[in-house]
Image (cartoon, rainbow, N blue to C red):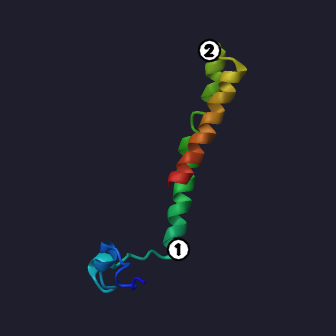
Amino acid sequence: MATSSSLRSRDTDTVQPPDSPASVRRQVSRRTGFWFAAIAFTVLMACGMAPTPLWPMYRAHDGFSATTTTVAFAMLVVGAAAGFLAL
């Protein structure tokens, strides 16, 4: 039967002690996190949907179909959702 010390991998032998600088994480307060998320949401909503009024104008001027305009709006929503997930 193998002992627990023989089951260790090489990675577990090089674990940094808890007080080492490599293992210290910077903590951010909940208030700072909230405002970061609120500002990110505002920027995505304000700038992400800015071209929305242009699509009906493109439809009239360039002869886009209703399907093309709908797909363009859908891609705006998908892009905003991807931005939220990435952020």
Where in the figure is residue 76, as x and y percent of width and height? 60, 37
> In the visual, does 78 lie left or right of 27?
right
Which mark, by number, is residue 61?
A: 2
Whether residue 15 is visible to the viewer of this picture, yes or no, is no
Q: Label 1 amino acid?
A: Arg
Q: Would you call the spot at circle 1 few (<14 residues within 10 Å), some (14-19), or many (20 or more)?
A: few
At horizontal 48% and vertical 76% (from top left) the residue drawn is 29
Q: In terms of depth relative to the viewer, which is nearer, 60 or 25?
A: 25
**Height in image: 11 above or below 50?**
below
Whether residue 45 is visible to the viewer of this picture, yes or no, is yes
Where in the figure is residue 19, as x and y percent of width and height? 31, 86
Where in the figure is residue 34, as x and y percent of width and height? 55, 68
Q: In terms of depth relative to the viewer, which is nearer, 76 or 16?
A: 16
At horizontal 30% and vertical 73% (from top left) the residue drawn is 10
Residue 3 lies in what quarter of the image? bottom left
Q: Which residue is mark 1?
A: 31
Rounded to the nearest whole Å, what is the CA distance between mark 2 and mark 1? 47 Å
- Which of the two labelled residues, at mark 2 and mark 1, occupies the earlier sequence position? 1
Q: Quadrant of the N terminus?
A: bottom left
**Height in image: 75 above or below 45?**
above
Element class at badge 2: helix
Q: In terms of depth relative to the viewer, which is nearer, 73 or 23?
A: 23
- The residue at the far right in this view is 66
Element class at badge 1: helix
Residue 55 lies in what quarter of the image? top right
Q: Label 2 amino acid?
A: His
